[in-house]
Image (cartoon, rainbow, N blue to C red):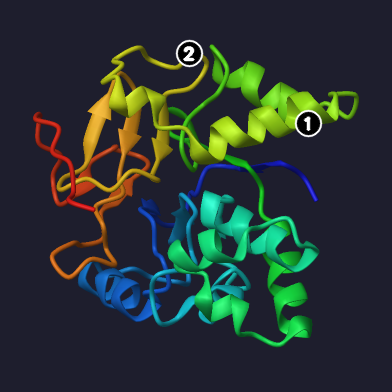
Amino acid sequence: MSFVQRFTRNTCGRDFAVGDIHGHFTLLQRRLEEIGFDAGQDRLFSVGDLVDRGPESDDALDWIDHPWFHAVRGNHEDMAIRWPSGNMDRANYAANGGSWNITNPRAHQLAVSSALGALPIAIEVETETGLVGIVHADCPRPTWSEFTAELVDPDLANSRRRALFEHALWSRDRIQGEDHTSVPDVRAVIVGHTPLKRPAVLGNVHFIDTGGWYRDGYFTLIDLATLETMPPTPKKLEWQDA
């Protein structure tokens, strides 16, 4: 297992990233059909949070086996990974949509933890116009290269690694502070985690979680070659109601 997964440029088809899925894979499949996604040559990258809140969380294990689908670990994967070992509070997990897994047989809980624990923390995708980074919540270091170097450093102290993961999977500091500082060493960083009414861009960080699991939400897709979103990204930052 590597905490950073790297992909060369797709010379045959298109590369897209999608916002948080949260157990709504049927709705996501419909969205892919709308854009003419070709699983034979296109690739889909996920910003994480495949599970919880929706009725199809168990389907996440099937989706991560698709050769064209690649996901980073989100904070909801983090909870599912920790649950079987007793490192996740039951009430907190249930309140965050984890009841589907709490009621699973223990053997299946362990299978879920193992499968989601194999997901990387960060993904890098080469495009014609430069490198695109994908992480669930935020880049926790001043530059992208510092972040990925620490992720793969075998000598990194456990306490420092835990803090790195915590920020990458859980932080909302950048968007809550509306920080327009760009992340160096990368053309763009694609994140989810914070549900918005519309996709938003702060510096070169693209926020694409538009609450696809909400009744009035939808899945935003971003073309990694052009950085154009479907639907388009407005200039004004709009928060999704929790």
Find residue 220 and report its horizontal and vertical position in percent: 25, 54
Q: Residues within 10 Å of mark 2 (few under 14, many from 20)?
A: some
Q: Amino acid at mark 1?
A: Val
Tell me: residue 33, above or below residue 170: below
Is 3 rendered above or below residue 176?
below
Q: Nearer the viewer, residue 152 or 89?
A: 89
Q: Position of residue 213 (x, y in %)?
A: 29, 67
Residue at x-position 13% and y-position 65%: 216
Q: Residue furthest bottom?
A: 105
User: For mark 2, what is the residue?
Assistant: 184
Tell me which numbered mark, 1 or 2, is placed earlier along the sequence: 1
Q: Nearer the viewer, residue 194 or 48?
A: 194
**Residue 95, picture quadrant:** bottom left
Q: What secondary structure is found at the residue carrying circle 1?
A: loop
Q: Position of residue 146 (x, y in %)?
A: 65, 16
The residue nearer to you, when weighing 62 against 106, is: 106
Identify the residue at image location x=37%, y=42%: 224
**Amino acid type at image mark 2:** Pro
Q: Element type at marker 2? A: loop
Residue 129 % position (x, y): 40, 28
Question: Which residue matches tag 1?
Answer: 152
